[in-house]
Image (cartoon, helix red, strand yellow):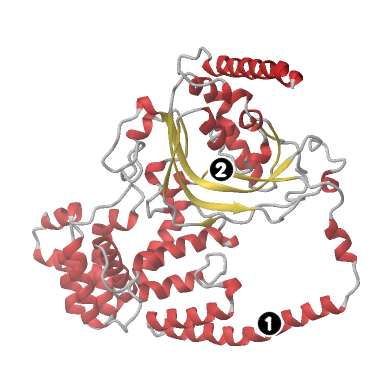
Amino acid sequence: MKRLLVSLPLVLLTGASLSCSLAAQTKGSRDSGQSNLMADSFAGKNACNPDNDLRPFIIEWDATDMSSFEQHAASDIVFVHYEGCSLRVLDECRNESIRGEQGAYKPAEWTSGSLETLDVNNEAELYAKLPLGQATLGGRVQGGEKFHMEYYVAGTRTASRDAVYQSDLAGKYGCEKATHFVHGYNLGAFALASSKNLTASAGGSAFGFGAGGSETRASSAEKKGGKLAVCDSESAKEVEGCKAPIRVTLRNIRPGENPEKTAMAAPDTPDSLAAAAIVNAKVEMSEEASARFQAAQRSMGAGDGKNCLKEFDAHDKLNAKNKSSDPKSGFGFMRGQCLMLAGQCDAGKALIRKSAEQAAHMKTMGPEQIDAMAQQYGSMYCQGKMNDRDTLLKAITTLSMGSNNSTLGAKGCEEAYQTVKKLKLKVKPKDGEDNTLIHLDGNLPAIAAGCFGRNGDCKAARAKMIESFAGERKAGFDKIKDPATLEKIYDDLVGAYSPKCKKV
């Protein structure tokens, strides 16, 4: 009992001393009032442990780092050294003579996306949400500053391989310090700034997202990648600004040998032969999928967009790995046309744009060319309710095609011409490269005369040609005072535009 009574005060004293020690550490001297306890806690000691966050944002990269990453990722898997709160790309860990030797990244898979927000109010949130930002933001957060970030994920690129083993990199110069490889990365845009420099907006975005491409609010961002303001655009040219790498998905380099090397050399077994039989059965089933595809083709040729989509949906259930709605499948162009024929013009153009970005034979096309191609498809196949621009472009295309095709009929030419006449002053060119509308006044006399003449109405061909002259050309004709000379000019022009109406 005595030993217990003697030792008890000692225990209490020790506990009191410990409490005072913790209180002293916790109180600290930060102006922000934040506790120093974070640094000595388990969370603090492990905050910069890469195993705790294998999907870090790469907001601290400058334009040079970002450009190097994109150039590297264009042809090879990216290897990194990830330690503490630092991630460094090992630019030399690749074989520049053999591109893709260790794998490559598949074409981007685009998503509908939505605006996401992220707030950092203290050190714990900085470590948890933006661990790589500790070097640049840590001191400011310790001082009590808070940060707000908005980001938009437009798509993802993933590696062609799921794992990399140490044996894969053994002896390769520049790879000695590799700890992880970038298995995938998100494309989109982000902007981050101190909360004290931001004001709320009616649209809910501090950086101009959804503001029709305006960069006014984005100017307050201290760090940004891509342009949030253009992420909801329907133009491939504009959306180029929403394809910056913003976040990476990392995987550890696995220890030892790559087991696939052994597995590939293994002899056939009953299990492997059974698996092969299942594959063969799926191949045989593809005949029905093929029949559905052919039925979709026939429906599209007949202008029946709804039935075309119905047949494609049936095909997709049988051929799930190559769905027509997947831009990578190769069927996206045709399904896009069927969507247009079914009255879903915007959806059809969107699928055709995405399919063009995935097509190997279109890799050299720029976003402007892709936009123009999607619009050309729209002007040929869009049906139903359309906006004024699409309606005008379709009418222009109809007149142009009517110049070479007599199946439209004079009535069809008249409907298209009246649509053009009604909308050509209302719809303005969207930019300096919108050549169809920029040169419409100059081209309209020719396509109008060509359409009516090809479809058997030379009187209308001449009348519409004369009516549609505009600008300097119209002014030039008005200066000709001799009626016979003017008539001869009109005869020659209508004959040139429509050989069927040429006077012998």
Residue 385: x, y in percent?
26, 70
Which circle marks residue 247 in the picture? Answer: 2
- In this picture, residue 210 sits left or right of residue 414: right
Q: Nearer the viewer, residue 73 or 482?
A: 73
| Residue type highlighted by circle 1 | Val
- In this picture, residue 432 sits left or right of residue 65: left
Looking at the rendering, which quadrant does residue 124 occupy?
top right
Looking at the rendering, which quadrant does residue 460 occupy?
bottom left
Q: Residue at x 61, y 15 (%)?
A: 21
Residue 490: x, y in percent?
19, 67
Q: Residue at x 52, y 58 (%)?
A: 357
The secondary structure type at the circle numbered 1 is helix
How far apart, in angstroms, are the residues tagged by discs 2 and 1? 38 Å
- In this picture, residue 350 sits left or right of residue 458: right
Q: Residue at x 51, y 73 (%)?
A: 324
Residue that badge 1 annotates: 283
The quarter of the picture where the N terminus appears is top right
| Residue type highlighted by circle 2 | Arg
Q: Is 76 rendered above or below residue 265?
A: above
